Image: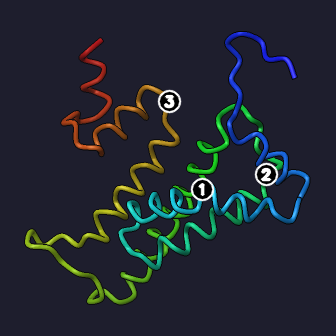
Amino acid sequence: MTVSPGARTDVDADLVEALRREEPEAAEQLVERFGDRVYRLAQRITGVKEDAEEAAQDALWTAARKIGTFKGESAFGSWLYRIAANAAYQKLRSRRGKAVADPGAQQVNAEGHGEQDKQAELADRVDQAGHMGGVDRVVVVTDEAGDGRQGKDDHQEDQ
């Protein structure tokens, strides 16, 4: 294989091809290579071990099943992490629905805010950001990361 200068080679190309060929060991390789990282991402998003385990399992299964939709325009790991984040956010949304059914089930911190509420609100904002244009989306997500920006109006003042 000849690689032109400046072309990127995905370090996981062998795994992607094995998944596409539905090789029996490919799913195992996927779990071995990415399982811990996918779980840690889901754990950071959900904050709940059981939800993170379910989201990680869902993400890995979805990636293996939907490998045909991977276009290779980004690194395979990036594609997989987006699937994992979506699975974790889905867990937050479903947990929020359960919390509404049983409002006393949520832990409340000293300020009177439930950690699950904050995580669910963040998930909603990230979902909303996915529908914005590129620069606006970066500002919203950056604001949620706590850099002090207040949204797209602040960004427009910088220009």
Q: Is residue 34 above or below residue 90?
A: above
Kind of residue sitting beneath label 1: Phe
Name the residue that disc number 1 marks. Answer: 34
Whether the residues at callouts 1 and 2 have beta carbons within 8 Å, the answer is: no
From the viewer's perspective, is 74 left or right of 89?
right
Q: Position of residue 53 (x, y in %)?
A: 52, 74
Kind of residue sitting beneath label 3: Gly
- Rendering quarter of residue 49: bottom left
Say which of 105 and 63 sits in front.
63
Say which of 79 and 142 sits in front.
79
Q: Nearer the viewer, mark 1 or mark 2?
A: 1
User: How far, Cα to Cα, is label 1 from label 2?
Assistant: 15 Å
Residue 67 is marked as: 2
- Rendered residue at 26%/89% (across/down): 104
Q: Nearer the viewer, mark 3 or mark 1?
A: 1
Name the residue that disc number 3 marks. Answer: 133
Residue 112 is marked as: none
Point out the tag, 1 or 2, that comes first from the N-terminus: 1
Q: Regarding mark 3 in the picture, which secondary structure is present there?
A: loop
